[in-house]
Image (cartoon, rainbow, N blue to C red):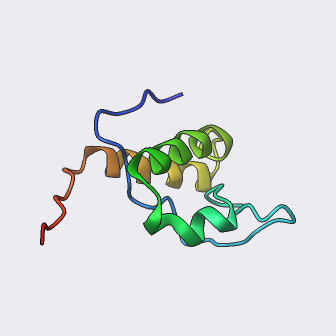
Amino acid sequence: MEPVTTNPVTKKPCIDICEFNKKDICKACGRTYQEKKEWKRLSDDQKQAIWQRILVSHGSGKGKQPRALRALYEKAKHKKPKHKKKN
């Protein structure tokens, strides 16, 4: 699948079709309910690892949802990272 980028993709992979199966995995993006709930608290490396996993599991098909997920990843991958404010 996709090689890991230099800068991790930290944008959430939500494609606005949230429906969880019996295993608490979103049918659209592939994240678990727990991953979705804790996304903001995850490290950049954890987010990148989730992206890599869901691109294989949910982004590899030819349908509308896999295309949307891959497009979101590509758009986020090419976006310049935001610098966090220092206090």
Comparing 23 with 14, the one in front is 23
Q: Is residue 27 left or right of residue 16?
A: right
Quarter of the figure with the N terminus: top right
User: Can residue 15 be seen in this snapshot?
Assistant: no
Query: Residue 40, position in %: x, y?
Result: 44, 68
The residue depicted at 78 percent of the width and 65 percent of the height is 24
Asked if residue 22 lies left or right of residue 43, the reply is right
Rendered image quadrant of residue 83: bottom left
> At x 60% / y 46%, what residue is drawn?
54
User: At which x and y percent is residue 69?
Assistant: 52, 52
Q: Quadrant of residue 23?
A: bottom right
Residue 85 image point, x, y percent: 14, 67
Inspect this view and state whether residue 59 appears: yes
Residue, x 60% and y 56% (percent of image)? 65
Say which of 79 and 48 sits in front: 48
Relative image position of residue 25 (x, y in whole percent):
74, 61
Q: Residue furthest front?
A: 87
Farthest-out residue, right:
22
Residue appearing at x 12%, y 72% in the figure: 87
Above or below, 2 relative to 87: above
Figure quadrant of residue 45: top left
